Image: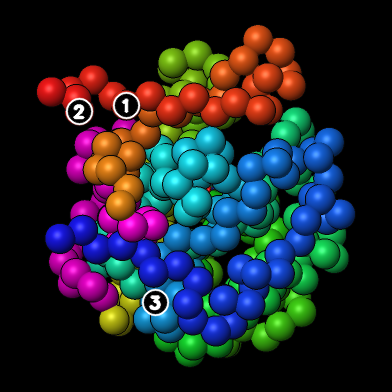
Amino acid sequence: MSEFCPGYVHAPFDALAAAFPDESAYPFADFRTEWGPIFHRGRLDGSARVLVIGQDPGPHENILRRILVGEAGRRAQGFLAKIGITRSYVLLNALLYSVYGAKGARYVSKPKVQDYRNLWIDAVISSGNVEAVVTFGGMAEKAWAGYANVHSPPSGLPVQHLTHPTFPESAGGTKAERQANTRKMLKQWNGALQVLHPAITHKDAPDSLVLYGDAFVETDKVDIPSADLPAGIPRWMYDNDGWTRRTGATVLDKRRNITVTVPDGVIP
Ligand code: URA
């Protein structure tokens, strides 16, 4: 049996998913608003113990309609597993739509963007069950600040602001620079693991802490569970990424087209 995400059935997320900011908050010039908003991944039934905030959705997210489902998602999932959290999480992004161009960060604190995002964050935190918050990347850190400055998160709630999981690749540079950035990021993540592992008392998997080495190994990355995705998603879409990309000869073509390719070995 494949478990699946029931979607937006719990209040207030049902109402939030029905009334989302459109291009008046996320202009077409700076966002791929044409692909619609992508709201979350994980538990919306009040059982989440960790809130993760990411950045913005990419093409994999545009297709699967859940956030952090590609390489960054598998790395984030692996981080959560190391603190004993295999299903009790909610992931939100700082931005609802994929950033187009370089101006996305300017929108994180704009009132229409922030106020709506704060409704989601507040609904997650209001369960009273969240034991830690993790932000990945600068936009996510700003998103949390935009919440914490307006609402009052529970005092003593551990919050860790971490480098975005795919920063080493997005920063570019040589292979040696990428390796150095990865090493630096994992050192920072290890510091956070040592704070969060003891702080989270309701773990899904109470294993002892295994820190990262200098580079990701395959066991540091965890596949996206089918329980986080809409019903009927084929396994190859959540076991790995790299099956979709924006394609086209012109900038406009690339905005209009996402090509999905079934990987080798799936069709007998
Ligand atoms: N995909 C997301 O949904 N968020 C990120 O931060 C990165 C990739």
Mark 1 belongs to which amino acid?
Answer: Val
Total marks in image: 3
- State which tag comes first along the sequence, 1 or 3: 3
Reply above or below: 185 against 215. below
Q: What element carries label 1?
A: loop
Residue under the point 32% across and 48% down: 233
Mark 2 belongs to which amino acid?
Answer: Val
Please tell me which residue lies in front, 110 or 182. Answer: 110
Callout 2 crowding tier (Cα within 10 Å): few <14, some 14–19, many ≥20: few
Please tell me which residue lies in front, 258 or 186. Answer: 258
Residue 157 visible to an observer of this rendering: no
Q: Mark 2 points at which residue?
A: 266
Reply above or below: 142 against 117. above
Give the percent coordinates (x, y) of residue 125: 54, 81
Whole-number angstrom distance, CA of label 1 to CA of label 2: 7 Å
Q: Mark 1 points at which residue?
A: 262
Q: Name the residue under label 3.
A: 49
